[in-house]
Image (spheres, helix red, strand yellow):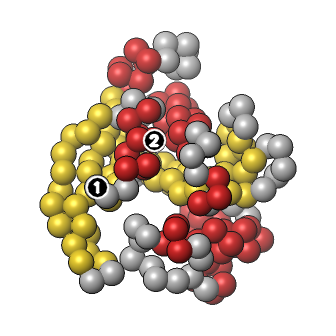
């Protein structure tokens, strides 16, 4: 499966994608808001294998796509949407981008497309995301694509010797449709 934006292709993972994922996941800038302190080839192979296996689900409820630059075919991250089951009308999104590609609007472009996919193709009613409160770049991405802050979960995550607050964001189908009236036709 593939989704396209102006600069990106969001495509299903293949098992051979792991070296590109390892290249950005071992970057200390990337690791800042994750429990991991480092990543190995074995870690990332397992990570990518999980996405490949999810593609075989029937019915499929988890779509984690490799984010690839159209111009160079370089894999620079991943972006996905997951719902609890095929009966569910809501889902959660997640995304990550190689630090060398931060600040170029690429995460916003990928997240916007994954939200469109959720509403237009999966028929969802609500899409949510959570982020570490101290990650302002990630919160900006969510706000740019129209998600609203719904709450703060204090000390929700624990890693790297401390607790972290988490912010919960969401958008409803009608809010997305108001912002993008032609994208859901």
Q: Residues within 10 Å of mark 2 (few under 14, many from 20)?
A: some
Asked if 106 appears above or below 184 in the picture, the reply is: below
Q: Of all residues shown, which one is farthest toward the left?
A: 154
Which of the 4 quarters of the picture holds residue 157? bottom left
Q: What residue would you read off at disc 1?
A: 133
Q: Is label 1 in a helix, a strand or a loop?
A: loop
Can you give x and y, in whole percent of width and height, for residue 54 in the image?
57, 62
User: Is 159 on the left-hand or right-hand side of 184?
Assistant: left
Depth check: give the residue in front, 62 or 86. Answer: 62
Depth check: give the residue in front, 97 or 61. Answer: 97
Count the labels in the image: 2
Depth check: give the residue in front, 74 or 86. Answer: 74
- Residue 141 numbered mark, or none: 2
Query: Mark 2 or mark 1, which has the lower sequence index?
Result: 1
Q: Residue at x 72, y 68 (%)?
A: 20
Can you give x and y, in whole percent of width and height, for residue 36 in the image?
45, 79
Q: Is residue 162 visible?
A: yes
User: Is 70 on the left-hand or right-hand side of 65?
Assistant: right
Asked if 52 appears above or below 151 in the picture, the reply is: below
Asked if 129 appears above or below 158 in the picture, the reply is: above
Q: Residues within 10 Å of mark 1 (few under 14, many from 20)?
A: some
Which of the 4 quarters of the picture holds residue 55? bottom right
User: Is 14 on the left-hand or right-hand side of 64?
Assistant: right
Can you give x and y, in whole percent of width and height, for residue 92 in the image?
39, 49
Q: Name the quadrant of the C terminus.
A: top right
Cα–Cα span, label 2 and label 1: 13 Å
């Amino acid at each position: 499966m593939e989704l396209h934006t102006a600069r990106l292709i969001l495509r299903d993972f293949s098992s051979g994608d792991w070296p590109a994922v390892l290249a950005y996941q071992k970057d200390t800038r990337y690791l800042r808001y994750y429990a991991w302190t480092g990543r190995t080839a074995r870690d990332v192979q397992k990570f990518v294998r999980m996405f490949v296996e999810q593609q075989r689900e029937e019915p499929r409820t988890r779509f984690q796509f490799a984010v690839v630059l159209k111009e160079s075919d370089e894999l620079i991250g991943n972006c996905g949407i997951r719902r609890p089951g095929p009966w569910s009308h809501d889902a959660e999104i997640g995304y990550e981008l190689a630090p060398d590609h931060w600040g170029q609007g690429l995460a916003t472009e990928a997240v916007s497309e994954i939200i469109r996919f959720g509403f237009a193709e999966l028929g969802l009613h609500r899409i949510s995301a959570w982020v570490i409160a101290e990650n302002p770049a990630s919160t900006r991405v969510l706000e740019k694509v129209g998600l609203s802050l719904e709450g703060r979960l204090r000390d929700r995550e624990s890693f790297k010797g401390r607790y972290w607050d988490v912010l919960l964001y969401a958008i409803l189908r009608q809010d997305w449709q108001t912002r993008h009236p032609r994208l859901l036709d």
